[in-house]
Image (cartoon, rainbow, N blue to C red):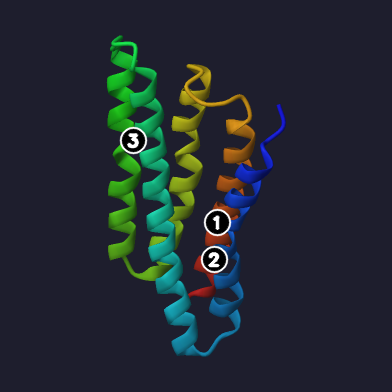
Amino acid sequence: EAIPPPARWLGYGGVLPFAMAVPAIWLGSEAASGFAAFAVVLYGAVILSFLGGLAWGATSAATVEGRWELTHSRLLAASVVPPLIAWGAALLPPGYGLVVLALSFVGVLAIDRRLASLRMVPPWWMKLRRQLSLTVAALLLVAAFGTG
């Protein structure tokens, strides 16, 4: 199924700060590079936390009928992991934080796949999430290798 244009535009608009940080990290002065690395770690932490919130919301919405299953408890538990990792990544030196975030953006796809398999998200969800997460992870790794 096609990704709705607003979801595509807003999703890829959210990738722009990651993309803008890479040249600043690689080509900027030492001060500019350090600030860009710090800023993109914080932005990545916010977005990774947002993804955990999406999983919490999708799981909560799926239980409106009053049915509660073990799967829902596991998904709620999994949804709080991204913000915890994000917080830890923000406390690390930027180069390490960027790598942790990159791996986490790939890892959160497992939560998304589970939500999709349970039909808790729209049919286009995984296509968009895969595109965005893999793009962000690649940008974060390129940024990490630019930190010295």
Relative to 26, residue 76 above or below: above
Look at 36% across and 40% down and name the residue there: 53
* Residues packed near mark 1 inside 10 Å, few (<14), some (14 to 19) or many (20 plus): some
Q: Position of residue 137 (x, y in %)?
A: 54, 53
Q: Amino acid at mark 2?
A: Pro
Judge whether 106 appears above or below 39 on screen. above
Q: Marks 1 and 2: CB-CB under 8 Å?
A: yes
148 displayed left or right of 87: right
Q: Position of residue 125 (x, y in %)?
A: 58, 32
Residue under circle 1? 14
Tell me how far mark 1 sits from mark 2, CA to CA.
Answer: 7 Å
| The one of 143 and 12 positioned closer to us in this rendering | 12
What residue does disc 3 label? 79
Q: Nearer the viewer, residue 4 or 56?
A: 4
Q: Residue at x 44, y 88 (%)?
A: 31
* Residue hosting label 2: 17
Q: Nearer the viewer, mark 3 or mark 1?
A: 1
* Label 3 packing within 10 angstroms: few (<14), some (14-19), many (20+): many
Vertical position of residue 65 compared to residue 39: above or below? above
Q: Which mark is residue 28?
A: none
- Tell me the quadrant of the picture where the N terminus can be found: top right
Of the numbered discs 3 and 2, the one sitting upstream in the chain is 2
Q: Determine the CA span between mark 3 and mark 1.
A: 20 Å
